[in-house]
Image: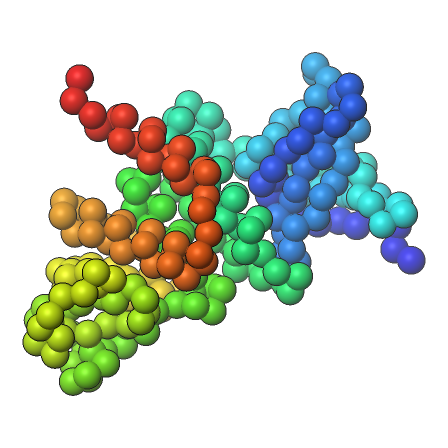
Amino acid sequence: MQTHLNIRGLVIRETALHDADKLIDLLTENGIRTVQAKSARKQGSKYGAVTQLFAYGDFCLRCSSGKYYLDSAVSLNLFYGLRNDLEALALASYFSELIRRTMTDQPQPQLLRLFLLSLHHLSEHSRPAALVKSIFELRLMTELGVMPDLLCCKECLTFLPEHPVLRIQQADLICRDCNPVPEPDELDVPQAVLHAARHVVFSEYNKLFQFRLKGQSAEIFSQYAERYLLERLGMNFPTLKFYHQLADSSIAPQ
């Protein structure tokens, strides 16, 4: 039986244990592993930084009686930019909750890659936080196998309708000419939003964040990605509510 395991992972949850220990949930290419890190909460602990929330590193684990204990670790990225941006930190916490509640027992290496890319852009502030959120939500649905069908209008098969309509419950695309009566689960979107949604669903990871949206298009895309995720998962997320409270307060008139 293997007694030691070397893995690369991202800390997506930490829980205080005993006087100075902690439990950390590591997101790896092969799922989530819960690890006990002894004395990691002691002041001056050499593993304090690498076991903090959203630290990414190489971990050497000792396996005993079906449990994992931290033997050593080396940090690869601590995403320092999250620490002084409460909105970005709230979004990262929302991503963590999404992953923890949708992760299966099967290896899903792309989920780790998606999380790391999203944390990079949040930490570096290289993309608007709301856009990172929308990309994460829609690509997560794609990786879980419940992506929308955005190839063409389901009625007339037009690839790029003049007036696109994204349907939430039906998880597809239709044009307003084919469906003249609006329904509550539909969103009339600019073509730019359709292009963005297609890009997120179909692009390679090295190009996933290589686009921008502004103004009303960005707002509509954000609304679509969130509504689509909530409809498909049928869950409530306290971290999402907290993020919206922060985001709404930041744009409220002074």
Q: Residue at x 77, y 36 (%)?
A: 36
Q: Residue at x 9, y 73 (%)?
A: 180
Residue that sits furthest to the bottom in the current view: 156
Q: Quadrant of residue 64?
A: top right
Quarter holding the C terminus is top left
- From the top left corner, tell me how far across and down residue 46 is, in percent: 72, 24
**Left/right of residue 73 with respect to residue 215 in the rendered view:** right
Q: How many marks?
A: 0
- Residue 12 vs 41, above or below: the answer is below
Q: Is residue 46 visible?
A: no
- From the top left corner, tell me how far across and down residue 176 is, in percent: 11, 71
**Left/right of residue 33 with respect to residue 206 in the rendered view:** right
Q: Residue at x 70, y 21 (%)?
A: 41
Which residue occupies the foreground of this view, 107 or 145?
A: 145
Q: Residue at x 61, y 37 (%)?
A: 13
- Residue 62 vs 173, above or below: the answer is above
- From the top left corner, tell me how far across and down residue 122 is, in percent: 39, 38
Q: Quadrant of residue 53?
A: top right
Quarter holding the N terminus is bottom right
Q: Is residue 177 visible?
A: yes
Which residue occupies the foreground of this view, 43 or 210?
A: 43
Which residue occupies the foreground of this view, 124 or 224?
A: 224
- Residue 174 vs 187, above or below: the answer is below
| Colouring method of the image | rainbow
**Left/right of residue 154 with respect to residue 129 in the rendered view:** left
- From the top left corner, tell me how far across and down residue 106 is, in percent: 64, 64
